[in-house]
Amino acid sequence: MPLVNKHKMTEQKLAANRLNGLMSRGAVTPAGKARVAAANLRHGYYSESAEVALAALGENPAEFQRRLQSLVDTYEPANALEMSLVMQLARALWRMERFHRMAESLAVNHLEQARKNHELKDAILLMPFIERMERLKELFNVTCADWESNIGPEEMQVFENCRGDLPEEKAKEVLVLLLRLRKPGVTDDLGPAAKLLDPDGAIPAAEGEERMGVRRELGAVLARQVEPLEKRILGHEEDPVQAQLERDKVLADAQPKAALMNQGEESSLRQVLRITKLLMNIKRAARLQEKIENAECSQDVIENKWSQNGQNAACQDVYENK
């Protein structure tokens, strides 16, 4: 819907326009012909270099062309000056949207970088707990996964690797259970911790169904040590309120750059308003001039010339009804 209201054509004005048309043969001088040609210019203002620039910026030249055509349809520029203003208006609106998009992209990039840094920080903080959990799970797998296996030097070495991950009393409890799962009669090569705890092999190896009970007890002890580690790692969820505060801080740190984008957007907006006001004033002045010319034409032509010979019936009717 055009923003500029079209002047309503009266019968008197139509008659005057017809008379003027009969007396005019169009532009004759080179300057006049140039003005007529300029009045019909549309996309000639949109150069190939502008298309290349938009494409280089990742923007769609065809979309700009559609925006320009929409403004042309709205303001209906009647000459080169008005067309130039419409073109400036299109560019100002396009720049305003560009600055807005740049500000949003800047905020998103800052938040994304902050998220990656936060994840890296969490990974560094949680790494010791993850490694501790993995060592305990490995001990569980080599001692409890196979119900028929015996505990030998290899299994005891796995225990030595994760011994420091267990509280001292739990480490002793696990070691006793491991010694009870060794092959009956075997006391050598079970590691320094076993020799220190049971130098004489006094801890008896479980036999028969008793071994299954000892293995279940060992699995339960290790599971109780792994469970809190898993909860701490998997349940490491951020507080929504704290997360929002951190995002706000990131955006605040990026504010100086965002302010430049906002200034560019506001500058483009002021230009849009200024150009729009200028266009409307030009249109208003053109309508006023058209009214004056039509009034003069009606007075001079209809009363002084065409009323005498009756060459135009429409003007004669207007004259007789005045």
Image (cartoon, helix red, strand yellow):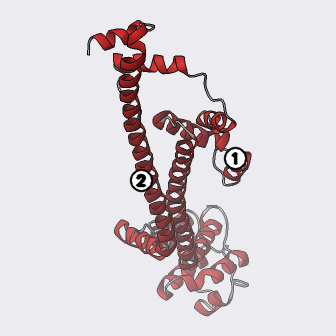
Badge 2 local density, few (<14 within 10 Å), some, or many (20+)? some
Q: Residue at x 40, y 50 (%)?
A: 277
- The answer to whether residue 205 is visible is no
Provide residue 58's location: percent of width, then percent of height. Answer: 66, 51
**Viewer-closest of 152 and 15:** 15
User: Is the residue 308 above or below the residue 240 in the image?
Assistant: above
Provide residue 291's location: percent of width, then percent of height. Answer: 37, 32
Q: Residue at x 63, y 79 (%)?
A: 159
Provide residue 171's location: percent of width, then percent of height. Answer: 53, 83
Task: Determine which residue is flagged by label 1.
Answer: 51
Q: Quadrant of the N terminus?
A: top left
**Label 2 amino acid?**
Leu
Provide residue 99's location: percent of width, then percent of height. Answer: 52, 59
**Viewer-closest of 224 and 173:** 224
Corner quadrant of residue 248: bottom left
Corner quadrant of residue 318: top left
Look at the numbered disc 2 and give the secondary structure of its residue: helix
Task: Determine which residue is flagged by label 2.
Answer: 273
Look at the numbered disc 1 and give the secondary structure of its residue: helix
- The answer to whether residue 51 is visible is yes
Q: CA distance from mark 2 to mark 1?
A: 25 Å
User: Is the residue 206 above or below the residue 73 in the image?
Assistant: below
- Tally the marks: 2
Corner quadrant of residue 266: bottom left
**Label 1 amino acid?**
Glu
Q: From the viewer's perspective, is 230 left or right of 30?
A: left
